[in-house]
Image: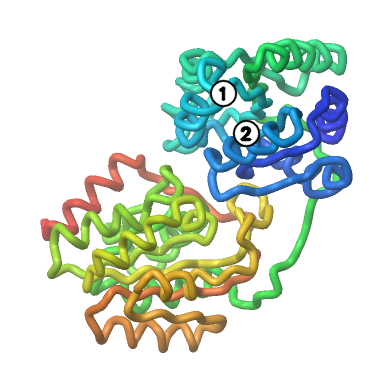
Amino acid sequence: MRASTFLQEVRKIGIDTAAGVPDSTLKQFCDALCLDGGAVFRHYVTANEGAAVGLAAGAYLATKRPCLVYLQNSGLGNIINPLASIANDEVYGIPMLFVVGWRGEPGTQDEPQHIYQGKVTCELLEVMGVPFSVIDADTTAVQLKEILAKAGAQFAENRQYAVVVRRGAFAKEQEFLWENGCDLLREQALKVILEKVYQQTFIVSTTGKISRELYEQSDALYGAHDRLFMTVGGMGHASMIAYGMAQADPDKRIVCVDGDGAVMMHMGALGFLAKQAPKNMVHIVINNAAHESVGAVPTGCSGQSYAQIARECGYENVYLVRTAPELETALSEVLRCRALSMIEVMVSLDARADLGRPRESAMENKIRFMEAYRGR
């Protein structure tokens, strides 16, 4: 199925606004939205999936038109609260169409953070009272019309409907490509970070390619990665995991290597961290202005400086760097002092096509990290 065809059919049932968070299963869908879809849809990449539900609710109140909310199935957790307490037909009754990328579908191979979520995806929709249909590469145009007719019937009852998308459902079309204007490669920046901090700190890294690149490079540099905790799921929560460690053991230095999309997803953590002011924590934000790990779609905050936001929140030391030498200098300075610090690193969108994945399970890596942390 062509994603552009899917969007055309969605437009025919009265939807002209789309909001959500990109997903690799929905890459062709997101590409179509960012290209031709932009001519017929108002399109917003929101901070998180729950925010997209809020936007959809507001747009419906103003126009009486349902909106399309797209997300990876991991984002179902972020929409449960606004879906249950705002959109549900027993509260305000606000119709909307969910398009859900099905990562970790039972019977398929996927990364560890998607396995359980994949098992319960359909159950979560059922518990939330959202009827759904599953589409795949064999779904026909006639079947799609029937599915959207079912969605329209739900909208008439002030309810929601979901289309769950299997991997490979959408055919490849024109790819959405853009440049962010930065020159520093992310892998180069991460190598500098590891060389400066790995042996004297413990690192918590965010989900996506940042963790995968740190994993490969720490093995290449040190023959180990036991001082690295890779937060392979729970996008946006790495900084709070790092703080949990920092407050539990003030004598250990904790470095959080975060991503700009992850920080945006739960930005309230910046205010909390600034208020707590852990002196043994360094917060590094790798900023390429995109959800690069799931298709390089620009974030809804492209062009914003997280360093400036951190400064206003109350981080004691803040740095914005664009080159490897600037990063080395900033790291040297934050390691010499004991104060909550942020280093925002502006990087390009480039990534190796042959980038590997952790060989061990998430559980095995957790055990190794905890043993190293406790000196065993």
Q: CA distance from mark 1 to mark 2?
A: 9 Å
Give the quadrant of residue 150.
top right
Total number of numbered labels? 2
Q: Is residue 326 visible?
A: yes
**Which of the pair 253/171 is nearer the observer?**
253
Q: Earlier in the sequence, mark 1 or mark 2?
A: 2
Q: Is residue 275 left or right of residue 323?
A: left
- The correct choice, above or below, for 261 with respect to 154 in the image is below
Q: Is residue 1 visible?
A: no
Instruction: Give the number of the disc on residue 124.
Output: none
Is there CB contact under 8 Å for labels 1 and 2?
A: yes
Instruction: Give the number of the disc on residue 92.
Output: 1
The image shows residue 72 at horizontal and vertical percentages of: 57, 35
Secondary structure beneath disc 1? Answer: loop
Number of the front mark, 1 or 2:
1
Give the quadrant of residue 362.
top left
**Label 2 environment density (alpha carbons within 10 Å; few <14, some 14–19, many ≥20):** many
**Amino acid beneath label 2:** Ala
The residue located at (56%, 23%) in the rendering is: 92
**Which of the pair 372/255 is nearer the observer?**
255
The image shows residue 227 at horizontal and vertical percentages of: 27, 61
The residue located at (44%, 77%) in the rendering is: 192
Secondary structure beneath disc 2? Answer: helix
The residue located at (71%, 32%) in the rendering is: 67
**Amino acid beneath label 1:** Tyr
Location of the N terminus (image quadrant): top right
Q: Is residue 69 left or right of residue 363?
A: right
Q: Badge 2 is on which residue?
A: 57
- The correct choice, above or below, for 123 with respect to 287 in the image is above
